[in-house]
Image: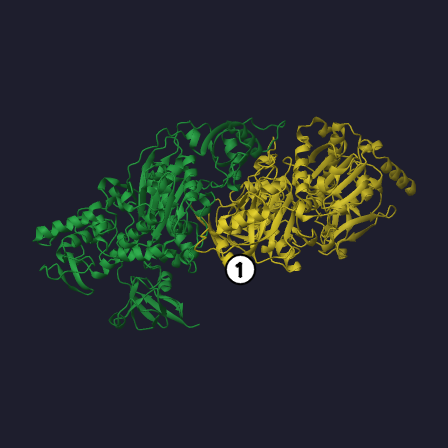
Chain colours: A yellow, B green
Amino acid sequence: MAEHIVTFDLAPQPIRVPTGTLLIEAARLAGIDIGQPCGGQGRCGRCAVIVNDGGVRRRSTLRLSNEDVAAGYALACQAVVEGDITVVVPPQEKIERRLTTDRVVADVTVPIGYDPDRVQTIKRVTVTLTPPSMDDQTDDWSRLQVALRQATGVNEVSASLNTLRRIGSILRENDWQVTAIIDSAVRNPHSAIEDPVPAVRLIDLKPGNVPDHAPMWGAAIDIGTTTVTCWLVDLISGEVKKQAAEYNRQIARGEDVISRIIYASKNGGGAELQSLVVNSINALIDEVCLHATIKPIDIVKATVSGNSTMIHLLLNIPASSIRLSPFITAINHVPLLTANEIGLLINPEATIDCLPGVASYVGADITAGVLSSGLADTDKSTLFMDVGTNGEIVLGSRDWLVTCACSAGPAFEGAGVIDGMRATKGAIEEVWINNETFEPTYRVIGSVKPRGVCGSGLISLLSELFITGLIDKGGNFNTYLGTERIRSGAHGLEYVIAFADHTEHNRDIAITPVDIDNLLRAKAAIYAGFSVLADRVGVPLESVEQILIGGSFGKYINVENAIQIGLLPDLPWDRFQFLGNTSVKGAYRALLDRTDRDRIADIAARMTYIELSADNTFYEAFTSALFLPHTDLSKFPSVEEALMKSITSNE
Amino acid sequence: MAEHIVTFDLAPQPIRVPTGTLLIEAARLAGIDIGQPCGGQGRCGRCAVIVNDGGVRRRSTLRLSNEDVAAGYALACQAVVEGDITVVVPPQEKIERRLTTDRVVADVTVPIGYDPDRVQTIKRVTVTLTPPSMDDQTDDWSRLQVALRQATGVNEVSASLNTLRRIGSILRENDWQVTAIIDSAVRNPHSAIEDPVPAVRLIDLKPGNVPDHAPMWGAAIDIGTTTVTCWLVDLISGEVKKQAAEYNRQIARGEDVISRIIYASKNGGGAELQSLVVNSINALIDEVCLHATIKPIDIVKATVSGNSTMIHLLLNIPASSIRLSPFITAINHVPLLTANEIGLLINPEATIDCLPGVASYVGADITAGVLSSGLADTDKSTLFMDVGTNGEIVLGSRDWLVTCACSAGPAFEGAGVIDGMRATKGAIEEVWINNETFEPTYRVIGSVKPRGVCGSGLISLLSELFITGLIDKGGNFNTYLGTERIRSGAHGLEYVIAFADHTEHNRDIAITPVDIDNLLRAKAAIYAGFSVLADRVGVPLESVEQILIGGSFGKYINVENAIQIGLLPDLPWDRFQFLGNTSVKGAYRALLDRTDRDRIADIAARMTYIELSADNTFYEAFTSALFLPHTDLSKFPSVEEALMKSITSNE
């Protein structure tokens, strides 16, 4: 096959590739990392590069105008090399790894009465063995097993080959006294059968007698589509010693789960995505360990929460059936694994417990959230939602649970919105618009010049635009208000939130009809989800006694704004509680307490999942919710009142 | 640190090494493989190389004469580089891999009444699943688990992460009908507790419905210190389809277990030895599969037998405590492993069952041999011996078993004897000496010119030398017989078996006092072992009702000769049976039948091990046995008679 020379401006030297090589592959061969927010589907247009010399064939130019193509633009994920070319890679938006600290650290308290002896699966046992002699030539492993069986009362002790390799020297170097770290959860945790043959697995051996009160480390991990969170936990005291979070490094290969699944299904894509998220987790582990001045190898257990796709990708289990009807996961109940099986750089024998999910779009993040939010303990009819990249909703109480997932899309994470961005430094997080001058005021994360608008800012902006009459209930701009903030732009009319001289990047920050449409679709999907669940169980939405909102994003939503755009149902504000990252909190609970772990499995088993794509009432509810706040304004009395006030004050 | 240039005659280019590098390491860096039969201890002298230019320091020159050193010889394992040097590597004896076929293939029959449904742990189960739908979104793994639980009646089905990764696609590609290969032996096989929660492990999934009678492949493997044997077995019919053997590739790193343990304890030595023996096994697997026209991946189970050191080295578990008092193994009962854990290139999920040993020098080869030899089934008082590189002995019957190990050394494998060699093409395997002319006749393996003498040939030679009066009971040459075959050589008097013009390498083949001494020590150790065991249980040796001799070497021993040198007790010949490789036969039985596997564990548990180095009577018995046939000739009436006849015929 013919070969061609591809010269990237960012690469130290040209490379040779055969005819038909995708530009994105050529870039990778040249050592250049080009982000692919849509996972390489040609949908997002963010991997556009400029090709001189014309030797490419563009598979799809939907994202490129004729002018773009004429100017040499090509999507790296959709263009193949057909001749010698020179490629210029324009600067991409850099994905910051570190999250703003105040958005990361959660308040958390050790569960009252936490008793590791009773509920912690990981135990420490010090044993002193009789040294071998000519009269007692028992092998090392049998000698240790007998001592551990006597000390713990279990019937069977297992160990990996790696552990077996270490036993002889550690016993001899420590005069036959060692402290064993063992895991008493050996069988699959979701097994319904009580195990009558208690067994433990040996995780590690420490020299001599480790004092009972010495810390023993675990990690609670939440893999969000956007953000990965890690808590370092002392399994003895139960305390969370350190917290850290960073963007999921998979983002550069797709911003939503669908893009990631598509990327993973490509050759080598699954292994690459696994490696990216494992790198994210390992970086967080390093960070929390550094701050706690411990070594990662001292972490002997981790629980992992996350949506079903994230769990599949962590394990490099093919996830393609998740996105194709009838939307089936490969696995909901993952067996217990060890750290070395997935490449986590903690103790290689550490137990990794991936929490159980319910369905393709209701994963462990939700089952863990149902536990940590208290929904499973309450008598009140409760709506729980986790607003992340996807919107999952649970309606229920102690006695019953129904759940669904709305493909809200990543609009509230700042994607699909031209000036949208994640909630990081430079993001406008709240907006107020004067209802006479139509001039905005805003608050920026980090108190710097803005670069864009994050999710909470978008909700706030949409609400203000609506309440001040800048847009109507259909989301269309009013042109008769006489403000220069509304103007005609590349995508039609737009409202300018910040002019270039007030922004960090010296470009205007504006919201366009395309953005508004995406936001309306996102909020409508979520509200329609509420409606369908409520409808299905015959509980009117207005009788819901509490609304628990998880997701670190959720924490920053202004309830009034969210009700005004029809994202949340119109209920008294005191029924809303913002709980932060309920997923990592559930992982933390499961890390500490085997009964809580069992309860999460029980929650997964008890949840009735409603597949919205198979539900006739969903589309109707969605269409009705595409307006601000809703087709039926009577469902939003407080908004009606606010609109009246606004109109009155303008008169 | 200073660097020096080392130029090997066999290497394409010189290399640079720091001061203090061992010559053997430098050779490896240069890509030259120098055999180290003693494991790099400086004992065997076989790694001698010639160093020009003098820039080496010799750590030990015990194996080198002053003349050798003056001529530039240095032991590569004991000399360190201190300056720029040029090294000439003399040709070493090449280790042939392939064994003479007729010494490899054993007669074997399928156990009568073999019923895989009843006794085989590996099962095949065809299941047809209801495909998922919008009304049944059960995950793939749960769906398969439920079907397998229903089909097999077990409570729990486990699978590795690698298997979990494959499930989704294989189910979808085969219309939800698959045949599962499962292992019902999940818990450690030696566990004394009956498992009340039956569980199976999923090994593989095959498309569609595999017919019940289709073969299902297993491998029985015996790792001898010298020879590795592999049998390919159809687990359905029980038939051994192919057999193959080759020299253990570890030989170049030590010819006996002690040398190997020392080599393994060096940096990287353990991993290297593991890799060498795994390569041996994989080569045999390839060979048997090629001949049977199947793929290695179709092998789903293997049992492994071998002495304790071989099992440790296969698993790269440190073995150093085996050779140091009080001689402790790291592990006797190895948990079930999978092929990918140790690098066997068969089905990566194939169950690997290493059979249990008793002690450092009584390993799985003996427990397997006790089963396959029938010793554990007989009412007769029986002596079982496995004469390989080590001599292990068991005395017992159905009801009782005592065992010991004699450090016989590898003399009967041809090592430690100047013209000794393994039983391969060119080896003299039997010798007759005319008691008038003292001229020898001999038979050579492969009917070619001889290169040396193998174990059976050495026994035969020693016996003939003794019976003809060429040597006396102390092993000393008689000089008054007037034969030119006895002459003075570099090591004192020697007897020439073949003169240079009759040998393949054009050098004389002779036996020297050093060789005779080594052979006497080897046979004395074994006979002393017999004596101690018999003494300990109060069974006189002459009342032993049968003697079962295992080890493929044993098969070629001439009983008359062996009795005449005092290697075997003087019993009627019909009490001796030569069983060939009893170790691989035991592995084969355990591969087929879980009850036989359990019986081997039971044999291991029941054997009383007598540590000879802690036994006062052993040294005495050994000293008495250092003569031909023994100090006490009354123990060998048939030899006394033969000697009388010989003397009479000479008079």
Q: Chain under label 1?
A: A
Across and down, in percent, residue A431 comes to 80, 48
Q: Quadrant of residue B258?
A: bottom left
User: Residue A35: x percent and y percent?
Assistant: 60, 49
Compared with A171, A311 (above or below) is above
Give the residue drawn at x 60%, y 27%.
Answer: B133
Near-viewer residue (B449 or B29): B449
Residue that mark 1 sits on: A174
Q: Residues within 10 Å of mark 1 (few under 14, many from 20)?
A: some
Q: Between A47 and A289, which is closer to the camera in this rendering?
A: A289
Residue A20 location in percent, x, y? Answer: 48, 44
Q: Quadrant of residue B263?
A: bottom left
Nearer to me, B202 or A142: A142
Could you say which is closer to the camera, residue B27 or residue B449? Answer: B449
The quadrant the N terminus of chain B occupies is bottom left
When asked about the image quadrant of residue A365, the answer is top right
Residue B271 in picture, x, y percent from top left: 42, 54
Outermost residue toward the left in this view: B651
Q: Is residue B518 visible?
A: yes
Q: Give the residue type at disc 1.
A: Asn
Q: In the visual, does A306 lie left or right of B117?
A: right
Q: Would residue B255 be found to the left or right of residue A604 on screen?
A: left
Q: Across the whole image, how many numbered discs are drawn on residues?
A: 1
Image position of A593 (left or right of B610):
right
